[in-house]
Amino acid sequence: MIGHESQSNFTTMMRAAKNGDISVVSCEDAKGRSFEVLCVVAQTPDEEYAYLPFGLMLSPPLYKFMNKLSPPKRLKGEWIWDDED
């Protein structure tokens, strides 16, 4: 269902999550807006930390907008969200 590169990235993210190597980092863009970034955290050979961003936590949550999306027809299983406005 997803491309090879996306599958590889997802596998890496899941391995990091299983190992407890995921962090939420508060960031600020050039306009001063705050947002949260999901990062894989690794330790460098110099024992410093390196952060690899892979996702954003959005505010407001996307649930209100999910009923406007349709899942791919070949998706196995249910597409679940709260239907309330």
Image: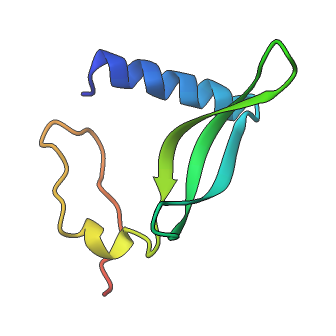
Image-based side of 69 in relation to 3, left or right: left
Question: Percent x, y for residue 29?
Answer: 49, 60
- Residue at the far front: name it: 30
- Give the residue displayed 66% in from the left and 52% down from the top: 25
Work out whether 20 lies above or below 15. Answer: below
Q: Disc count in the image? A: 0
Q: Dividing the image into 4 quarters, which one contains the C terminus?
A: bottom left
Image-based side of 31 in relation to 46, left or right: left
Res 68 quadrant in image? bottom left
Residue toward you, 53 or 46? 46
Question: Percent x, y for residue 10?
Answer: 46, 28
Work out whether 55 lies above or below 33. Answer: above
- Residue at the far bottom: name it: 85
- Give the residue displayed 82% in from the left and 12% down from the top: 45
Q: How is the image coloured?
A: rainbow
Question: Percent x, y for residue 23?
Answer: 69, 45
Question: Percent x, y for residue 51?
Answer: 65, 34
Residue toward you, 44 or 39? 44
Res 83 quadrant in image? bottom left
- Give the residue displayed 58% in from the left and 30% down from the top: 14
Residue toward you, 8 or 30? 30
Q: Dividing the image into 4 quarters, which one contains the N terminus?
A: top left
Res 3 quadrant in image? top left
Work out whether 60 lies above or below 70. Answer: below
- Residue at the far left: name it: 73
- Residue at the far right: name it: 47
Image-based side of 58 in relation to 78, left or right: right
- Give the residue displayed 28% in from the left and 66% down from the top: 66
